Image: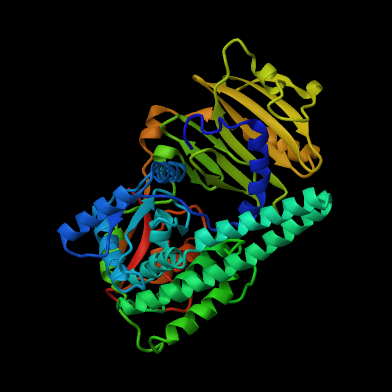
Amino acid sequence: MSPRGGAAPARRLVRGLVARVAGLAMAGLLLAGCAKLEAQADAPAAASASRISSFEDSLTPAQRKEHERLVQSYGGAYNDPKLQALIQDTISRLVAASERPELNYRVTVLNSPAVNAFALPNGSLYVTRGLVALADDRAELASVLAHEMGHVIANHAAIREDQMKQAILVSRVISNVVNDADLGALALEKSRQSLASFSRAQELEADAIGVGISARAGFDPYGASRFLTAMGRQAALRSGDATKSAANDPTADFLASHPATPERISIAIANAREYAAPDKEGERDRDEYLSAINGMVYGDDPKEGFIRGRRFFHPKLGFTFTAPENFTLENTPQAVLGATSDGREALRLDAVRVTGDQSLAQYLSSGWIDGVEINSVESLVLNGFPAATAVARGDQWSFRMFAIRFGSDVYRMIFAARELTPDIDASFRAAASTFRRVSIDEADKVQPQRVRVVSVGLTDTIDKLAARMDVPDKPVERFLVLNGMDRADKLSYGDKVKIISAD
């Protein structure tokens, strides 16, 4: 979360809060950012530099602006020379083995703990730091990069844009010419549903293209199925049920617009079998990959604040708060978001500027959110800070809002509930009362979590290594997901495994 990350108009803010409830409740895997990396097809340094220059020269001002916006919205770029070198070599091999070796690509690692990747039509590829940490070898990372290259090669973004323009045109014709707005809206909705199916087909096509590229580049073609399995298990873990997995739970989709994870896994395995038998895997380069990510920041970057269980802590801005019980928190550059697993309660914390001549009670009543009950507006003091609170009610959601003046900013804590009962309202008030300043000593003690690669000792077991994980809960489950292992797997002396440790 950055200062004044919530400066957007409040009506849009609240709509966004409600829209995020479902996503947080399902714990879908999102995408975020890290380090900028120029990666081209030619291995020699001179040729690579030439292609980098060519790629940058080919971008329009609008494309450069879009790239900067994307990187900023996902927490900036994560710079790590070891990781950059590995990704550049990987993408160079993939491009040379692709159907379009003349295309240039730029890979940006986004400084975000979320797990995702995406591509723009101009060849800009993005992967998050969280995705890099989840991958267990170079072949898995190569499968992700090759998949995103597949979207570019197949021109999916441009096709989708043309299809949507056509759908909008059809709906306008029906609405205006036939003079039936309801029928026009129905036509647009059906077109959008068709586009969603088309998007799923695009994902499967990109999967097939990506597996082929990875295999021809010499990487293990089964890397895609392994990484898809890891994403499904990660999604299930985040949703609070580690017994679910991509192999047995069709609801463990990581994005609604993608095919069900089990479907993608089975198709990815079938695609891989066209290039190699399961007992004849290709190159995985696990040791090299683990060496490249050893020491990488894991989870939230303290510069943007971090989450430990239900607690959010921002050492740079100097405050902390604790969410109500049963809430899962997510930190974004714009705000801290949270929701319960059933999706019936949510919260948002952000910062705005409120002029000194306007009281906080007046601010809550000023119309930035609809449905404020004026008789509920109340001025108060929270841990020494001036504050105000109020209730707003809509058709489906009710809100308990707080405005807290902290330094030159005002922090807004917006709690939402399908039904704002007295007990729920009391829990919201109790959570707001945990907002407090952190001391300099407390802030100085904060260290980021990092991926640490360790060797398995003679007496080490899964439980012993998991006990070394600096995580808020479920250390065994998180260790297994992080290392692509099952509970019944056996460790061998000298094996390399990932753990999470704070410096």
72 and 229: which is toward the camera: 72
**Residue 392 screen position, x and y as percent:** 76, 31
216 and 377: which is toward the camera: 216
- In the figure, is residue 486 to the left or right of 395? left
Q: How is the image coloured?
A: rainbow
As drawn, which residue projects farthest toward the top? 357
How many numbered callouts? 0
- In the figure, is residue 175 to the left or right of 282? right
**Residue 122 screen position, x and y as percent:** 40, 55
Q: Check the image and report above or below for 78 versus 219.
A: above
Q: Check the image and report above or below for 461 versus 179.
A: below
Residue 243 in view: no
Q: Residue at x 16, y 63 (%)?
A: 44
Q: Residue at x 34, y 48 (%)?
A: 78
**Residue 79 screen position, x and y as percent:** 30, 48
**Residue 260 screen position, x and y as percent:** 60, 70
Q: Residue at x 48, y 69 (%)?
A: 230
Residue 262 in view: yes
As drawn, which residue projects farthest toward the front? 177
- Splitting the image into 4 quarters, where does residue 365 fall? top right
- In the figure, is residue 238 to the left or right of 74? right
- Splitting the image into 4 quarters, where does residue 401 fall? top right
